[in-house]
Image (cartoon, rainbow, N blue to C red):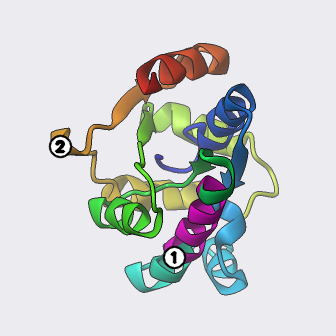
Amino acid sequence: MGVSGCGKSTLGALMAEALDCAFLEGDGFHSNEAIEKMRGGCPLTDEDRWPWLDRLGAAMDRAVTEQGIAVAACSALRKGYRDRLRAAIGAPVRFILLENSRDRLLARLAGRPGHYMPASLLESQLATLERPLAEEGALILRTDDAPALLRDAALDWLR
C-alpha cells in the first residue's frame, strides 16, 4: 500500500514471485471512468474508490480461495479502505506501507511516462493517506533500499 510512485507494483511482483502466488495489480481494477478522471488530474473520491476496492477485494478473495495466498498492489490510503478490503477477503490480510519523501516520489512519477496517474495528484494522495494504526499490524518500509532488500524484509516479517 502507499501513494503512487512508492514502489507497490515492483515489490508486489517480487513478493508474488517469491511466494509462487498470484499478483493482482490494483490499477487494473479501476473503472475506465476513474482512470480518465485521474488522467485529467482530478483526484478520486470515496464514491469512486468503493467499487474499485470491492472489485479488487473480490478478486483477492478468489485468488486466496484458489491458491491459499495472493499479493496485491493497492494504494489502500485510508483505514476504511483497508477495512473494506479485509472484509472482502475471507482470510487474514497483511498490509505493507511503502513510503518515501515527496521529492523522491515526484522523481519516480516523472520516470513513468504514459501512466494515467499524473504527478499533480501526489499531493491529494499524501493528504488522503492515513498511516496504519498500531492495531492494524502493518509493516512500514522506507523505499530507499533496493527492491530485493525490501522483498526480503517483507518476507521475513510475514514469516
Q: Range of the magenta residues?
A: 53-64
N-terminal of the pair, mark 2 or mark 1, is 1
In the rendered image, residue 109, in percent from the top left (x then y), is placed at: 64, 45
Residue 70 located within the stretch drawn in magenta: no
Residue located 36% across and 31% down the image: 139
Look at the picture and state if 88 lies above or below 15: below
Q: Are marks 2 and 1 in contact (CB under 8 Å)?
A: no
Disc 1: which residue: 54
* Residue in view at x 43 percent, y 34 percent: 99
Front residue of 127 and 103: 127
Residue 90 is drawn in which quadrant?
bottom left
Disc 2 designates what residue? 135
Q: Amino acid at mark 1?
A: Asp
- Magenta segment's dominant SS is helix
> Which residue is nearer to you in this view: 49 or 86?
86
* Residue 81 makes an appearance in the image: yes
Mark 1 secondary-structure assignment: helix
The answer to which quarter of the image holds residue 97 is: top left
Task: Say what secondary structure mark 2 lies in.
Answer: helix
Outermost right residue = 114
Residue sitting at 33 percent across and 37 percent down?
138
Position of the C terminus by quadrant: top left
Is residue 112 left or right of 8 when viewed as pictured? right
